[in-house]
Image (cartoon, grey):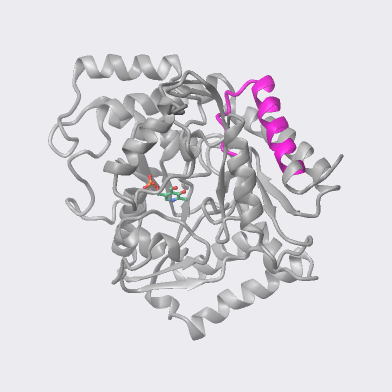
Amino acid sequence: MIKQMTNSQALLERRKKIVANGVGVFNTATVSKAKGAIITDVDGRELIDFAGGIGVVNAGHCPDSVVKAIQDQAAKYIHTSFNVVTYEPYIELCEKLAEILPHGDHTKAMLVSTGAEAVENAIKIARQATGRQAIIAFTEAYHGRTLMAMTLTSKIDYKLNCGPFAPEVYRLPFPNFYRYHGDKSEDEYVAIELKRLHESAKNVVNPKDVAAIIIEPIQGEGGFNPVPKKYFEGLRAFCDEHGIMLIADEIQSGFGRTGNWASWQSYNVTPDIGTYAKSLGSGMPIAAVLGKANVMDAAAPGTIGGTYIGSPICCAAALATIQLIKDEKLNERGIAIGNAIRSRFEALQKHCPEMGDVRGLGAMMAIEFVKNGDSQQPDGDLCQTIVANCAERGLIIISAGTFKNVIRILCPLVITDEQLNQGLDILEEEIKKATKKNI
Ligand SMILES: Cc1ncc(COP(=O)(O)O)c(C=O)c1O
């Protein structure tokens, strides 16, 4: 008997035939509609979404108020280009962003469409503000796939044979405490890494040539590695000492994910410039660069912009998303979700040395899988097995990390407790199965 393909399989076959191979795919799920934390595939199967379109739908799939804002705006005007004709949704969104994400006493903003574009523009602004060229980025960093953003990105898989890369980019080791602290306390480890930072002024690049240091306060694609608080404070002090712009890339960690509008607010370290995207627009392509007004104004007219900067429809979606995050108290909900995930994972970790580390900030939670409980032996195969088995059981979840050995949770923050527990049950069962634990 010939076995019939499911609609999902047929769609994936069509994808394989026509879509370029380089467009990677994390998962074999398909979608016909999505609402809240549930994706319905093209066979009518309901899937729990722990990936959130890679951290884009913190406010849920298709929230009613966002859908209405998009429809209302589309009926009025779709595009004029903000470089040509001024419209209010752009202005209002900049005002709202400056209110919730103040970068000092006076904050100014610019809007673009994607995270990578925000990063590109942040660098251009920092260079003009300082009159310097060099940029320092970190290992395990991810900042996007356009030329400068890809150059700043660390993982080779994302840039294989894509050079030449942008010049004047220097790299320091990210203070990845779990992987590299050995037997040192956090304070001891941070002291060593800060020494390395200060020595970089002697042996990596002259700080008088450095325009900016860009960092994800909690790395996304790198494996949800949080920067230790004292290191972040030390980085701020180093930037102040040498007149360097500190750029916080909050593209994956923003808008409720860590229990705040941005993770730097949890650290009490204010960057000169911040980049924001993803969950700002609930899936509409919108990104922002925010910064101290004098820094932002250093960019000469015409040097930052573009045809689609801050599309009115995307601005309307972002305004409705911010309102929804406020109304539904999704920052607080992010903390509660994070606590629920952490307590489940930490309980399981006691029986499971393969779960080398359970970490995160707010609902930006991850598990790092290793062999023999050893932080130096990443186990990507185990992680990928668990991810694939979860998918079979209707849980969409994605990995991260240099060695693809980290499971990261990016579920919508509007997820119900029942859906969250259902998803965590599947994940726990698959971890137990794959590590052969009979608990
Ligand atoms: C921290 C960070 N920066 C930049 C980007 C690039 O954003 P985009 O994919 O919208 O260009 C991403 C995307 O995952 C990200 O996580």
Q: Is residue 390 left or right of residue 115?
A: right
Which of the 4 image quadrants contains residue 128? bottom left
**Residue appearing at x 18%, y 21% in the figure:** 77
Q: Answer left or right for 93 relative to 332.
A: left
For the C terminus, the quadrant is: top right
Of 205 and 357, which appears nearest the observer? 357
- 92 relative position to 329: left or right: left
Front position in the image: 304 or 334: 334
Q: Is residue 381 magenta?
A: no
Q: Residue at x 52, y 31 (%)?
A: 58
Q: Residue furthest left?
A: 84
Q: How many marks?
A: 0
Q: Residue at x 31, y 53 (%)?
A: 121
Residue 87, compared with residue 359, is above or below; it is above
x then y, percent, for residue 223: 58, 54
Q: Position of residue 411 (x, y in %)?
A: 57, 33
Q: Splitting the image into 4 quarters, where does residue 31 fall? A: top left
- Magenta: main secondary structure: helix
- The image shows residue 244 at horizontal and vertical percentages of 44, 66
Camera sees residue 411? yes
419, above or below 151, in the image = above
Magenta stretch, residue numbers: 409-432
Q: Is residue 226 visible?
A: no
Residue extending farthest bottom: 203
Please tell me whether residue 429 belongs to the stretch shown in magenta. yes
Q: Residue 357 location, x and y as percent?
A: 73, 53
Tell me the residue at 69%/72% (across/down): 191
